[in-house]
Image: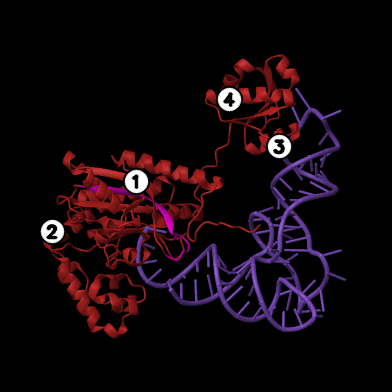
Amino acid sequence: MELKYRALEGMHDVLPESSHLWQYVESRWRTHCHQYGYREIRTPLLETAELFERSVGETSDIVSKEMYVFQRGEERYALKPEGTAPVVRAYLEHGLYAAGGVQKLYYITPFFRGERPQKGRYRQAHQFGVEIFGAAHPLADAELLSMVMAFFRVLGIPDDALELRLNTIGCPDCRPAYREAVRAFGRAHFGQLCNSCQARLERNPLRLLDCKECVALTAAAPPIDPYLCDACRTHFESLQSLLKSLGVAYRRDARLVRGLDYYTRTTFEVVAERGLGAQNALCGGGRYDGLVEELGGPPTPALGVGIGIERTLLVLQALQVPLPEPPSIDAYVVAFGDSARLVALQIAQRLRAAGLAVDLDLEGRSPKAQMRLANRSGARYAILLGETELQQDAATVKDLHTHEQTLVSQAELSEWIRTHL
RNA sequence: GGGAUCGUAGCUCAGUCGGUUAGAGCGCCUGACUGUGGCUCAGGAGGUCGUGGGUUCGAGUCCCAUCGGUCCCCCCA
């Protein structure tokens, strides 16, 4: 069959055979967030493009070449390319800071980036995220990281399948001096840098550090530690000691600077050892103490994380973590003969009203075909209705596992099924 | 944006050196069993071989282009 329309490149349908897995991880995520004191926030898919240009950064890859932007009238809109900026916008717009104290928000959202698709990378992808506003203390970083690792554990991903990579990139007080040091290093080795690093050396020199092409060279780049101000150093040290006390394993990765401009101090990623191919980051996040103010709000320390849902599912499958089966219905109603079809429909409705999951043939098919559908539906029971049953206001309930048949009055049907499930 | 690789039935694939009417398994439908599923058997539906062009007496097969999938670089979830 020639297809006139297909999903766009990098866009995917979630079909019934796997949608239950999405429902499963989503429901685990909601429960997990609730247990950690987070409340859900939902924001629109579309925002003004400027929101992301200001927050994620004009020079970032995400904004400069991956964002879906379109114009309508005077306004330029963007499909959200990441989850944090819209939440910050909503936090400000609705004055959530006025409530005082720490605000902990979670979300589940699609996001869009116009990249070449590959394994674990799509043009529309989905993420779980949380944002914490108003918490400057490293306790917040520590709880966030342990919460993320605990989530993967809840899903059944063994700790040793993952690696938490942790870094600090300082703050506006101390980072400029470090940035200069990296820039000076880059200039000194300019000829050995790859093309893209040569291009970003002046604009965003820290990005040299996560260029894979230049690792051999930048391994010798100056480390940030001596440049950290006292506050940043203390923050990072106490975070590390908290993680150790909490038993959260991590590896310091001094090259982890990440591609979004708004990060300060803590940055982190969780990478999977197997299952993801080249795009092996399961989640990423960090602290963004300056972003709320940058977007017009009061100075507000904040931090957050985004977890890739597709990537999480890939890892679960690659590690063969036990996952739920697709749900099946409780009963399938079979009508023997046309006179029984209306009663079949009525009985199905009554059973559904009683809370059972019930289906039946809608095509007027033969008894044999209906039985085949009953079998394929995965239902435990087939409810058989023919002349004999109708005359007694009863139904034959057939257990499709044991093949046992029982005559049950229609009045008692839902109760009978419920007690025998 | 650059690169590699693959496109034959709903799915997974076979198809020889270019040779007549393009095949299998699974799935689907029907029947054997006129009120009973899974197993078995029989039959059936389903393909312009991604698309366009070229070479050739002849193209699923060779060549070119194009579209799409997958994977990789870059970077990220």
Query: In the structure shown, which secondary structural element does the residue marked by tag 2 occupy?
Result: helix
Q: Is residue A131 magenta?
A: yes
Q: CA distance from mark 1 to mark 2?
A: 31 Å
Quarter placement of the N terminus of chain A: bottom right
How far across and how far down the image is residue A81, in percent? 35, 57
Dot placed on the residue nearer the N-terminal end, 2 or 3? 2
Q: In this picture, is A132 found above or below A383?
A: below
Res. A247 in view? no
Q: Is residue A81 magenta?
A: no
Residue A349 bears which disc, if any?
Answer: 4
Dot placed on the residue nearer the N-terminal end, 1 or 2? 1
Quarter-of-image position of residue A348: top right
Outermost top residue: A392
Query: In the structure shown, which secondary structural element does the residue marked by tag 4 occupy?
Result: helix
Q: Which residues are magenta?
A: A115-133
Q: CA distance from mark 4 to mark 3?
A: 21 Å
Which residue, given by chain and number where applicable, does mark 2 sit on? Answer: A231
Q: Chain ID for label 4? A: A
- Name which residue lies at 32% across and 45% down: A106
Give the colour chain A carries in the figure.
red
Q: Residue type at mark 4?
A: Gln
Q: Nearer the viewer, mark 1 or mark 2?
A: 1
Q: CA distance from mark 1 to mark 4?
A: 36 Å
Q: Chain ID for label 2? A: A
| Left or right placement of residue A321 versus residue A407 in this view | left
Mark 2 and mark 3 residues within 8 Å of each other at the beta carbon: no
Residue A372 bears which disc, if any?
Answer: 3
Q: In this picture, is A25 found above or below A361?
A: below
Q: Nearer the viewer, mark 2 or mark 3?
A: 3
